[in-house]
Amino acid sequence: MRLLVTGGSGFIGSAFCRRIRKDYPHFKLVNLDCLYPCSTTSLSTSTESYFFVKGNLCDASLVASTLKEHAIDTVVHFAAQSHVDTSFTNPLSYTQDNVVGTHTLLEACRAYGGIQRFVHISTDEVYGENTETVFTETSLLKPTNPYAATKASAEMLVHSYVHSYRFPAVVIRSNNVYGPGQYPEKVIPKFIFQLLDGKSLTIQGSGHQLRSFLYVEDAVNAVLCVLFQGALGEIYNISSCDEMTIRDLAKTLVKQLRPTSTLDECLTFIEDRHFNDKRYWIESKPLFALGWKQQVPFDEGLATTIAWFKSVDRATYWCDQRSPKKVLVWGARGWIGGQFLPLLVARGFTVVEATSRANDRPAVEAEVAAQKPTHIVSLIGRTHGPGSSTIDYLEQPGKLLENMTDNLYGPLVLASVAKASGCHMMYLGTGCIFTDNGTGHAFTEADTPNFFGSAYSTVKGFTDQIMSTDYADSCLNVRIRMPISSSPGPRNFISKIISYKKICSIPNSMTVLDDILPCIVECMERRIVGPLNATNPGTIEHNTILGWYKELQNATHTWDSIGQEELLSSCVKSARSNNTLDTSRIQSLFPSLPTIQVSVRRLLETQFFRAE
């Protein structure tokens, strides 16, 4: 057999590849994997009968050449993005990898013409949730999250090729698989590491969701059974008899890893998923008829898994610690850059300060080609200049070109070059592109900019829209507002307002950089894209901040409260954006993000501020 395994460096795929190499050494085995952070580093070296090919399934020419070069006759297709939580926040990347990737593979196999058997690995989540009636292979598919929807879509493509082209495919849908090697974004390894590291177990929602768990070697046995005996065109469920609630799973692990603690002492309940299926109950009669049965009891499999996670070298086993992360930064010398770059270095990024001008496209392209970064960061922007410390600088005659160059053209050049080069980009934009006109409406990432009261906000609004549409699949468009930080400086919003004698106090969303910048670094590591409202949850008024400043740091501080009319007539040259940003997305990514009031109060209690 000349076997191509896609995603063979992933959790189940790697276990399958190891079994093939152990039990079927006469097979020619080719592993095609793009080595996402969750992939293992242990299968990336080719041998006499095992060949590793690094690449993405969406690369049609690579897939076609791999099939032809190795004369492949059998495919087992594991490759997919599979973390449900991330699919809520970055669904387009799941469509790209799980749907487009599968279709590219199918079409390459069809054009190649030499495939005798194609095993497509799907999931029980394509059925959606159930409570009283068990799902069989003929049950209706009703996926309830973006990940499951992309897997169902991929299945539909496989079925269409079976019927339209008589393509020799078979589909497998499995319950949750666990075991040694699983990446710690999944619940069992995540809980194990949390307990080993002395942390609380984070449980989404109530923890009463039911899940069935299958040991990875039983899953490999099932795939082999279908590979060798399954009927072409058929579907096979892989079910487990080990079903429990997430809370009960936590209880079991606490008993094993922290026996002197009570369950309640070890739990922290966090916000639930946008939709969290109550149960996936499936049966496996067609697979049982082939002779497969579950062999590893849960307590035995869990003990083996715990022992493995206790001994694994976390720094080297998964690619997230081994893959080079190189970031090319424009705007590195600014106030925010001075705080952001050390965080990147601390997380293992190699940081290079760009030397080309962002508005010089040939120079940018040359620098990117020379440096070969994995990430590009744009911290550039024009908010002030000689003679003015505020955005009123851009209201002066002759400043339109400077505004357009620094706030629109330059960032878009970087976004275009990043996308063409396959780099992830982080663009630091602004949320000062909306106005609620006193309605209290909370603007989401999908809302269109509606504030045009200043030259700055108008141009930044256009940039935001282009980033959120044309570059939604390659750029993380970060919207911050009125940045506050423990780092002193004239750009610090607290330092600004304590220097003003007149204050127009309106509730606003604001960004505490000490909280938000680490989140942005993690988003870069996870290659999250699309617009992101990067403010702390909740709103705060200027007067609240000043009141705390007076209470905690300067009892003699005074200011005059004024309305918007007086602000515009005597204090500023252009209107100011006042709004609330909806923070649902960033809170789903980082559930422990503190509210703006808690964070600002803490800063004023621990850091000294002075007027700049």
Image (tube, rainbow, N blue to C red):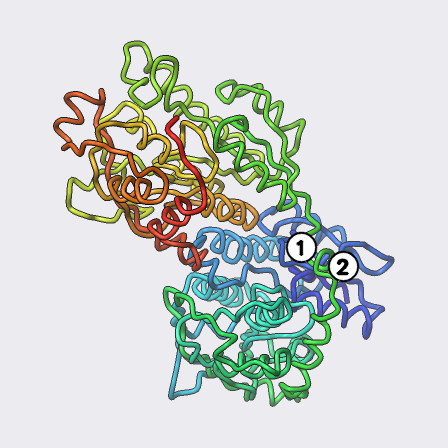
| Closer-to-camera residue (101/73) | 101
Look at 49% across and 31% down and name the residue there: 378
Residue that numbered label 2 is attached to: 43
| Closer-to-camera residue (456/80) | 456
Q: Amino acid at mark 2?
A: Leu
Q: Nearer the viewer, mark 1 or mark 2?
A: 2
* The C terminus, quarter of image: top left
Return the disc, 1 or 2, that comes first in the chain's sequence. Answer: 1
> Pointer 1: residues within 10 angstroms few (<14), some, or many (20+)?
many
Identify the disc placed on residue 33: 1
Place of residue 330 in the rendered image (x, y in percent of width and height, measured from the top left): 53, 27
| Closer-to-camera residue (165/214) | 214
Taking 586 as reference, is 259 left or right? right
Place of residue 208 in the rendered image (x, y in percent of width and height, measured from the top left): 42, 80
Identify whether 153 is placed above or below 242: above
- Compute the Cα span from label 1 to label 2: 10 Å
Place of residue 56 in the rendered image (x, y in percent of width and height, measured from the top left): 62, 50
Q: Amino acid at mark 1?
A: Asp
Residue 466 in view here: no
